[in-house]
Amino acid sequence: MRFETRAIHDGQAPDPRTGAVTVPVYQTSTYQQNAIGWPREGFEYSRTGNPTRQALEEALASLEGGKHGLAFASGVAASTAVLNLLKPGDHVVAGDDLYGGTYRLLDKIYRPWGLRISYADSTDPTAFAAAVCAETRLIWVETPTNPLLKIVDIPEVAEVARKAGAWLVVDNTFVSPYFQRPLELGADIVVHSTTKYLGGHSDVIGGAVITSDQDAWERIKFYQNAAGAVPGPWDAWLILRGLKTLSVRLREHERNALKLANRLEKHPAVERVYYPGLTSHPQHTLAAKQMSGFGGMISFELKGGFPAVERFVAKTTLFTLGESLGGVESLVCYPPQMTHAALGPEGRAQRGIRDNLLRLSVGLEHVEDLEHDLEQALE
Ligand SMILES: *Cc1c(COP(=O)(O)O)cnc(C)c1O
């Protein structure tokens, strides 16, 4: 069946006891056992397994085209679970344009723990090949990247990983499986912050791992139960509800974003626009090849530097100043002092994140209202 249908039905059959068409919120910590060591329906304790969470995990696996899904209490908890496949002394090659929290996790938690980490130019598969060494066990990328919306060539980097005997992990948060399915392009593991487009309504924090690799799945599942960063049933239910409308929302996010990106590109107050759907994007062809849509995230540089940025964010009314993305409401973020503050001025300069950069999460308001909001703030 097609994506839209699976988003509504997979893992979510009507409740066998009552016929309820939505998966119930199983707000329980434990389950009755028939005899010692014989749980009735395979559930024994909700850290280990919960029917609402299981429904979400099955739906996520289906949408990403993977065999197994695992849900976590946050995106970074999902990333942590994947990084725990490794042991001290192992080497990771990561793309150089990453979510700030992933960078922090690698550098401030896992480097002191004993992981060795190299960063490679996200846009250049040969840079990943050059960074690989005998101890490389994992390659970690995000595409499109945050905040500069660069595109990582997934099949090419998957080939580098395969030759190195390493797992390729793709953080697919920015465009969701509706527009991009990394497992079908050769990746081994997908991670998500379900907080963003999958939940879609800015009302829940969550994360997920999806894979068809049996060994990786068993080990991450063991870690999920042993370390315990699981979502509660309400949070799992909210994300499950978000999934049902993912396709409709994403099409509209993209339609609005494409229109706004075109407008911004023509505006005299704007220096440069980063949006993979624009033909001016240096990797537009690659983006069109590996994604079926370009998503709802736009970054742009304002003429007039930081003072112009301050004036702009003070003037927008629909674009709310805030971190996060992927919700129904439009947000504007200033990466240098918000999501990417931890990189420091040098780290940002190295990665091309300039002081006049703004990032938009284009929401589902009427596009003319959004256009008007941007226009009056740019005045
Ligand atoms: C938000 C985000 C994360 C972290 O997810 P949380 O749910 O905030 O823990 C990871 N990767 C990307 C690309 C994100 O945008």
Image: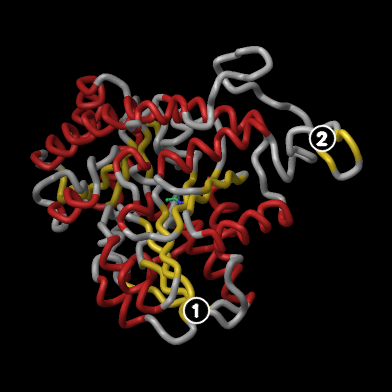
Secondary structure found at label 2: loop
Residue at image x 47%, y 54%?
A: 212
* Mark 2, residue position: 30
Check if mark 1's residue and mark 2's residue have beta carbons within 8 Å: no
Query: Which is nearer the eye, 303 or 26?
Result: 26
31 relative to 11 in the view: left or right:
right
Q: Position of residue 64 (x, y in %)?
A: 41, 44
79 relative to 268 in the view: left or right:
right
Q: Position of residue 275 (x, y in %)?
A: 21, 46
3D distance between C-alphas at marks 1 and 2: 40 Å
263 relative to 131 in the view: left or right:
left
Query: Which is nearer the eye, 183 or 97?
Result: 183
Residue at image x 56%, y 41%?
A: 206
Query: Which is nearer the eye, 103 or 286?
Result: 286
Q: Amino acid at mark 1?
A: His
Please tell me whether mark 1 or mark 2 is closer to you in this view.
2
Judged from this view, the residue extending furthest toward the bottom is 134
Q: Amino acid at mark 2?
A: Thr
Q: Which mark is residue 91?
A: 1
Secondary structure found at label 1: strand
Q: Residues within 10 Å of mark 1 (few under 14, many from 20)?
A: many
